[in-house]
Every structure is written in C-alpha cells, then in structure tokens.
Amino acid sequence: MNAAVALESRPEDFDWDRLVSGERRRAEAVACALGLAQELLGARVEGTPVAGRRLPPWLVPAVLRQWGSGSGWREPMSLFLRRPAGVLQELRRHWPNPIEATVGVGAPFNGFPRLPFQLASAAVRVARFALGLPVELWRARAQPSPKTEER
C-alpha cells in the first residue's frame, strides 16, 4: 500500500532513474512492488519505468495468499526446544513464501518456479538455526521449566 501512495503522490519531476538504479536485484524488487501497487491497488504507473511491464506469474498469487493468511507472525523455533507441542504447525508457518525466498537467496524476480528458491531459503534458515542451537540450548537450560513455573 505504501508503494501505491508513493506512486499517487509523486512529484512531476520524480527521479525514476535514481529509484531503479544501483543493484539490479533491488531495482527488480522495486519495479515489482510498483507493479503490484498497480495490479492490486489500482495505482497509476503511466510515465514510470514499470508501465507496460508484466509481473512474474507467481507474484500476485503469492501476495494474495500472504494477505489471506494473516499477519505472518512466527514464533521463534527456539521456543519449541523445551515444549515441542505444536512444532509441526509452527514449521509450516516458517516455510518461506515465494517472495521471502526470492529476496532471501538473492534470486531474480522472473517467471521461473519459486520452489527451488524456497528450498534453498529453508535450507539457509535451518543452517542458521543449527549454528545457533548450542546457544539456544544453553539459554533453555538456564531458564526454569514451564512445569516449575506453574507450581
């Protein structure tokens, strides 16, 4: 929505070259955000670098799925070290959506399927979690057990 507001309220002399210059992947992401503002919110993109540009076919459905699923809040997986109930449900929430995966692994916003990027992103997350696991286990051991707190 912020992109739509920015598009609609931009000054006549807005410097589009500056916005889409720099790192190519970032420029692609900006162009996709502007395209989404047009596609989903009706923002006007005439006279912009994204006018006439097609969005990747997976992008709009990914945004709509995310919007439909709520806030996207995730519990830290380290919370489940001491109480594993609900870990499988939480793992599903931690599965990277196509946009997260694309940005997370620095992939292009193109028409290629997102599953390989989602798998790579999930692998990176698992590796980060595993690397931090000794610290999390130490923290979990230092905290009182939930059963002890209830007494």
Image (cartoon, rainbow, N blue to C red):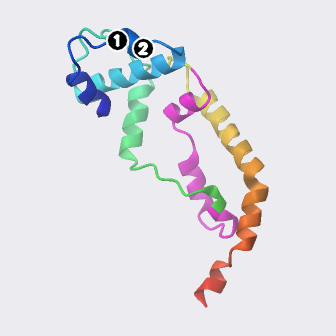
Residue nearest the observer in this picture, 80 or 25:
25
Residue in the image at 21% along x and 23% along y: 8
Q: Position of residue 109 (x, y in %)?
A: 50, 20
Q: Position of residue 96 (x, y in %)?
A: 56, 40
According to the image, label 2 marks what residue?
20
What is the total number of numbered labels drawn onto the structure image? Answer: 2
Q: Quadrant of residue 83?
A: bottom right
Q: Quadrant of the C terminus?
A: bottom right
Q: Position of residue 63 (x, y in %)?
A: 40, 34
Residue in the image at 63% along x and 79% along y: 146
According to the image, label 1 marks what residue?
16
Q: Mark 1 is on which residue type?
A: Trp
Q: Quadrant of residue 87?
A: bottom right
Q: Position of residue 101 (x, y in %)?
A: 57, 33
Element carrying mark 1: helix
Q: Mark 2 is on which residue type?
A: Val
Residue in the image at 57% along x and 56% along y: 90
Q: 10 Å neighbourhood of mark 1: few (<14), some, or many (≥20)?
A: few
Give the main secondary structure of the magenta stretch: helix
Lateral position of residue 142 relative to residue 88, left or right: right
Residue nearest the observer in this picture, 98 or 139:
139
| Pointer 2 with pointer 1, Cβ within 8 A | yes
Lateral position of residue 54 relative to residue 124, left or right: left
Magenta highlight range: 79-107
Element carrying mark 2: loop
